Image: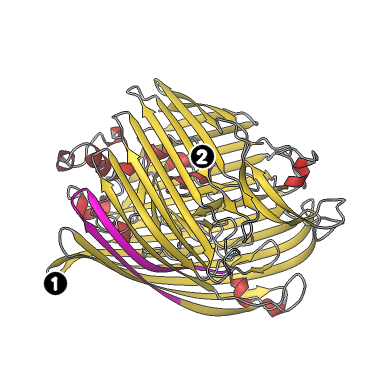
Amino acid sequence: MFRLPVGLLSFGKMINCVPVHRLKVNLITLASCAALADTACAQGVADDIEEVVVWGRAIDLVGAAVSASEGMVGFDDLSTRPLLRVGELVEVIPGMIATQHSGGGKANQYFLRGINLDHGTDFSVHFDGMPVNFRSHAHGQGYLDLNFIIPELVQTIEYHKGTYDAAAGDFSAASAAYFQTYDRLDRGFTKLTWGSENYWRAVGANSWDTAKGTWLAGADLQFSDGPWDNPEDVRRYNGLLKYSTKLAGLPAEFMATYYANDWNATDQIPLRSVQNGDLGRFGFVDPSVGGKTRRFNLIGNLETEATRYNLFFTSYGLNLYSNPTYFLNDPVNGDQFEQEDRRSVFGGRVDHTRDTRWLGRPLTLLAGLDTRYDHVSKLNLFNSGERTRLSAVRQDRVDEWSVGAYAAAEVSWSSRLRTTLGLRADFYDWDVSASRSENSGGGTDVVLNPKFGVAYAINDSWELYANYGGGFHSNDARAAELSVDPVTGNPAESFDAIVDAVGYEGGFRAVLSDRLNFSTAVFYLELDSELIFSGDDGTTVPNERTERIGIETALFWQATERITVDLSAAKTDARFSDAPAGADSVPDAQETIASAGATLVLENGTTTSLRVRYFGEAPLVEDESVSKSSTTLVNLGFTYPIGNFVLGFDVLNLLDAEENDIEFFYESRLRGEVSPVEDRHFHPVESRELRLNVGYEF
């Protein structure tokens, strides 16, 4: 089901040739209308819809968007990108970076708007209506693992930055993204990929029609070692089955996905060991870190003319072994620990939209309700050695339930001026059963957030925006009930269950032709705390209140019928609000992020894509006496069709840059060192990798 949040309420007004409830199917028609001619819409939905190229960024959002920083990306933009990892799909969001510091099965590390989002604390993702983030997670609050997604089956990615969308709740202060998969493929396919570093992947999918609906099935298998001295030995399995039909004449779809992964990991390594020659750039300290995980999802969606219903169920498990400090705490057995998570998640959502009039003006109303229940049967932390449990630090169970109600009203005061007023209320209820009884307990909390937006169209091509909104992320329920440090046994401070955020934004977007559009946004974001529960040591890590001011710009240019160019850049200044000058920098707050890409599509279907990603410098300590260096990566992709076959290759890290995915600065101790050492710890980018692929369409 295509979800129609506040920011896209006006889409229905843009496509008078198709019913609103069929909007998802006709996004392709919308893109073609924007890129070809106004007369295309008048002809209705083309029967040959599969031949229309979908560049989602070509969609004209003037008169439709609520903010300058929201947008949508279509399949053809996604499909031409050479990807090192699934998580890089989110890099279609201007100013976002997805990195990795601990193996090919762990959730990525995300950066946006000057925030180290860790594994998803202030960045939420929905997949066909299902929330992907996990709360009160064994490794980190908002844990966002996208490895269960098959990239070839993603049709669109819609994103809303900031705190301005009433339909976006927990973990959305920086951005919310909505992945939508295909209901039906025009052609089935299989693809085999072989790459250096012992990489190989097999993926295939097909759809078929029956008397009552359409089935879509896909599978994805991947095995790889990477350049690491301790091979990753990734073994990833993905499957998807989707059925689209009608119930009582209403569009409905049902989906099941299954994901499993098992891997070794190379955690970040200390710079001193590389400098003295003990380790190479791809070396390791603890050979037994890594993990295994699985996720099973059931998703159901139903639409009426004005209402969308969603239900979902998730069963999930993770065992993660890490050792970032080596022998700092335990000189004999080492500091390895295991984080264990077992949970079931149930939930759903209802969205209702209505077009009416108020004071003679067009009025679009949205009302919605979402709810979820997390039953976490195992939320454990163990001291371990070589993946063998030595002692228990925490063994907890958590039950957490929330319900969010939201409403928004968009009024068109004239053909130029629109305003959107929204309100969201969230209620949380939790219960913690801890192995240390002092840390058991339960509670409730409520948060209320207003939203407001103004859009003014200077003309048919230029539109200005101003936005304000409150947002939040929830904390780990264990942090709210903490009274005793589980490691030391000393008294510990508990923290609020809800962390507030407030955001402001001003900007514009311009559609200068059918082929060229760009947008710019200036934003301010304040977080009451970047406090998260640290699963690494079983307690909370408090940060002070922070504030960020930044600017982002994005451009899409279809230079010719065959060449498209996209460019985005973001610069952010992040500070602790109450810290003295000279000691107020936020560690890991990326100042500059930029990306650019050019794609050539020839008449015979041959494609060439070149992409550049720049990940700027960042302070690693508050006084900026230590900082990380920038990273620039170049990727190249090429495909060539021969009948029903498609041959291609990707060259990742084309220039073989010896740079880093991520850096930290902290104390660690290696075996044989008599005292802790403050040092840089880094995870390098992977060396140049060639991947050859052959596909067959049927």
Residue 147: in sight, yes or no?
no
In front: label 2 or label 1: 1
Task: Report how far apart the C-alphas of labels 2 and 1 lie in the structure.
Answer: 53 Å
| Residue 172 forms part of the magenta stretch | no
Which secondary structure, mark 2?
strand
Please tell me which residue is depicted at 78% across the width and 44% down the height of the picture. Answer: 273
Give residue 697's mark.
none
Give the quarter of the image for residue 27: top left
Residue 11 in the image: state x and y as whole percent. 25, 53
User: What is the crowding at mark 2: few (fewer than 14 residues within 10 Å), some, or many (at least 20)?
Assistant: some
Identify the residue position indicated by label 2 in the image: 219
Magenta segment, which residues? 447-476
The secondary structure making up most of the magenta span is strand
Picture layout, residue 417 above or below residue 441:
above
Residue 491 vertical position relative to residue 473 in the rendered view, above or below: below
**Residue at (60, 42) in percent of width and height:** 236
Residue indicated by mark 1 = 359
Q: Position of residue 642 (x, y in %)?
A: 41, 19
The picture places residue 52, in percent across and down from the top left corner, at: 28, 35
Question: In the rendered image, which quarter is residue 586 located in?
Answer: bottom right
Q: What residue type is labelled 1?
A: Leu
Q: Does residue 378 show up? A: yes
Residue drawn where x is 56% and y is 33% of the image = 653
Name the quarter where the C terminus is drawn: top left
Q: Which of 206 and 579 is in front in this view?
A: 579
Precedes in sequence: disc 2 or disc 1: 2
The type of residue carrying mark 2 is Ala
Against 507, residue 81 (above or below) is: above
Disc 2 to disc 1: CB gap under 8 Å:
no
